[in-house]
Amino acid sequence: MKKKFTKAGIVDYSVITLAVILMDIGIYVFKFPNHFSFGGVSGLAVVLNQMLGFSASQINLVINVGLLIFGFAVLGRGFGIKTAYAVILSSLILEVMEKTTPIPSPLTNQPVLELVYAIALPAVASGMLFYVDASGGGTDIIAMVLKKYTTIDIGTALLFTDAAIVCLSFAAFDTRTGLFSVCGLAAKSIFVDRTMEQMRLCKYFTIICSNPEPICDYIRDVLKRSATLYNAQGGYTHENKTVILCALNRKQAVLLQRYIRREDSDAFIMVTKSSETIGKGFRVSV
């Protein structure tokens, strides 16, 4: 059990590290220079940097620490540790970037192109972090609290928590920057939901066959999964059949399809995509 937990922990923290790197690239390279402030603590840092003159990375760290304490109290120790790691790592990377590679102005003269990257990279990162029950800190924590105590999905929760920051961008900058921030906020909430859906995607198999034992043995012994069986009768031939129901991840789904086609070409297979699979062997949704 300890070994399994350790392996799962390594995978989770590897995902968090990669997500933080993607998020910081999107924030520092594309978001800060263009003054995009479509939500999040990084968006608020852009506004406060303009109003107060403090470093955006330092503002980002201070606000995140306060929200991290709040997240610890409401969401529990496990969430807090992962998020603390993400917040500290993100702040260190932003600080190093600010000291070593200052970017005083946008990379290109194409704000729409840079907006795409400023949205996509942090949104994919947020989806990855939510998938392992963590967050990049900031308003993501507030969104997770809303998700825990309400029926609001993550994308909608982020939309609510970030809307006020977008309104501030109109006051801190010009109308053009504010309108870009509005577009960014709408796209971000959609992008996060789609990213999480793809990461959680599993395949649900309905297999109709005459000889279920080899298939079940393969599912149990090779794929390390289980299956549910029930008896059925063909509507045309009236032959007795066995229906096997099984949920697998995408890699296992490919292996099972290959095995059945090789060993039982008469089997009838229906594969359905499932964006939420809850239970033993799969991530539990709260």
Image: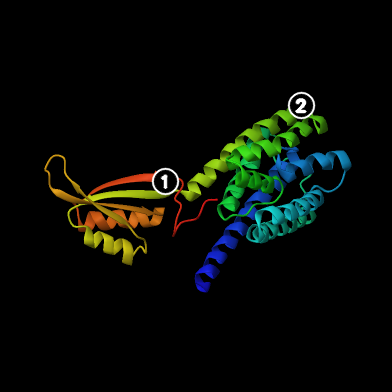
Residue 154, x across and y down, in percent: 59, 42
Helix, strand or loop at mark 1:
strand
Q: Residue at x 40, y 53 (%)?
A: 250
Give amino acid for label 2. Thr
Helix, strand or loop at mark 2:
helix
| Residue, disc 2 | 175
Q: Residue at x 76, y 46 (%)?
A: 103
Q: Nearer the viewer, residue 274 or 107?
A: 274
**Disc 2/disc 1 C-alpha distance (Å):** 42 Å
Q: Nearer the viewer, residue 208 or 104?
A: 208
Above or below for 57 versus 183: below
Q: Nearer the viewer, residue 27 or 238?
A: 238
Q: Is residue 58 left or right of residue 21?
A: right
**Count of labels shown?**
2
Characterize the local packing of mark 1: few (<14), some (14-19) or many (20 or more) Cα atoms within 10 angstroms: some
**Residue 105, numbered circle:** none
| Residue, disc 1 | 274
Q: Nearer the viewer, residue 169 or 115?
A: 169
| Image colouring | rainbow
